[in-house]
Image: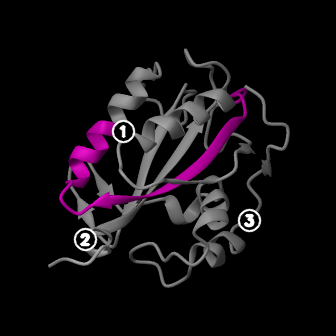
C-alpha cells in the first residue's frame, strides 16, 4: 500500500526561468508572463510556485534592446517525465506565444522559457544541458529564484541560490510593483 506522499517522493523540483521584452498575443511582457505561468501550471498536477515579476536591464544584448520582464517558476515534475520531453513542451509554449527564434544571442523575444534544473540531474546533449550552464551567473534568474527557493543548490554548485545571487555584481534588476496587464 502506498502512502499519500509516495507520488511526491518520485517527483523532483524543476525550475523554469521566464523572460519577455516584446508583447505577445497575450499583451504586454507582464501579461505574457502571467499567461505563461498559467500554461506551465497545465503541465503538472501540483501547484507551481511563482516568483514576482522583475524588470531587468538587457544583459549581453545589442544596444537599444528593450528592458526584459523576468520571473521564475518552480514545480514538481514527475520522475516519469523525461527532461527532453518537458523541454519540448516548453518550446511548444514559446511557439504558442509567438516566439521567433534567431541565431543571435540576446535577441528580443515575446517569451523565453529556460529549463534551469530538473532535480539533481546533470544532462549534456545537443538539445539540453542541465543544469542550465549560465544560471548561476545570471541575476535575472537568481534574484527571482532566491525569492521562492532561497536554499536550493543548483547541481554542481556548493552555494545556495541566495548565496550565489548575493555574490553577483549589479545587473540592473528591480521588482515590478505596478502589476498591470
Dot placed on the residue nearer the N-terminal end, 2 or 3: 2
Vertical arrangement, residue 44 with respect to residue 138, above or below: above
Q: Residue 90 has which mark?
A: 1
Q: Split into 4 quadrants, where in the image is the C terminus?
A: top right
User: Any magenta on residue 150?
Assistant: no
Kindly give the residue lying farthest to the right in the view shown. 178
- Image: magenta residue range: 63-89
Picture quarter containing residue 23?
Answer: top right
Comparing labels 1 and 2, the label whose residue is closer to the camera: 2
User: Badge 3 is on which residue?
Assistant: 169
Gap in angstroms between the C-alphas marked 3 and 1: 30 Å
Residue 141: quadrant of the picture:
bottom right
Q: Residues within 10 Å of mark 3 (few under 14, many from 20)?
A: few
The answer to whether 146 appears left or right of 175 in the picture is left
Sequence-wise, the earlier of marks 1 and 2 is 2
Q: CA distance from mark 2 to mark 3?
A: 37 Å
Mark 2 residue element: loop
Q: Is residue 33 left or right of residue 154?
A: right
**Mark 2, residues whose alpha carbon is within 10 Å: few (<14), some, or many (≥20)?**
few
Image point (72%, 34%), residue name: 67
Taking 64 as reference, is 54 above or below it? below
For disc 2, the marked residue is 10
> Which quadrant of the rendered structure holds the N terminus?
bottom left
Specify the quadrant of the image occupied by residue 4. bottom left
Left or right: residue 39 compared with residue 23: left
Lower position in the chain sequence, tag 3 or tag 1: 1
Give the residue displayed 78% in from the left and 29% down from the top. Answer: 180
Give coordinates of residue 138: x percent, y percent: 59, 58
Amino acid at each position: 500500500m502506498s502512502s499519500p506522499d509516495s507520488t511526491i517522493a518520485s517527483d523532483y523540483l524543476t525550475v523554469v526561468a521566464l523572460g519577455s521584452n516584446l508583447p505577445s498575443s497575450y499583451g504586454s511582457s507582464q501579461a505574457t508572463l502571467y499567461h505563461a505561468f498559467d500554461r506551465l501550471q497545465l503541465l503538472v498536477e501540483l501547484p507551481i510556485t511563482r516568483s514576482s515579476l522583475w524588470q531587468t536591464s538587457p544583459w549581453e544584448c545589442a544596444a537599444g534592446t528593450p528592458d526584459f520582464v523576468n520571473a521564475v517558476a518552480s514545480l514538481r515534475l514527475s520522475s516519469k517525465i523525461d527532461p527532453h520531453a518537458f523541454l519540448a513542451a516548453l518550446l511548444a509554449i514559446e511557439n504558442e506565444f509567438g516566439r521567433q527564434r534567431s541565431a543571435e544571442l540576446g535577441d528580443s523575444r515575446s517569451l523565453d522559457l529556460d529549463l534551469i534544473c530538473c532535480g539533481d540531474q546533470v544532462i549534456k546533449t545537443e538539445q539540453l544541458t542541465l543544469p542550465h550552464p549560465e544560471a548561476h551567473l545570471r541575476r535575472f534568474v537568481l534574484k527571482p529564484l532566491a525569492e521562492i527557493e532561497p536554499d536550493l543548490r543548483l547541481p554542481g554548485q556548493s552555494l545556495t541560490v541566495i548565496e550565489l545571487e548575493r555574490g553577483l555584481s549589479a545587473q540592473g534588476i528591480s521588482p515590478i510593483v505596478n502589476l498591470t496587464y
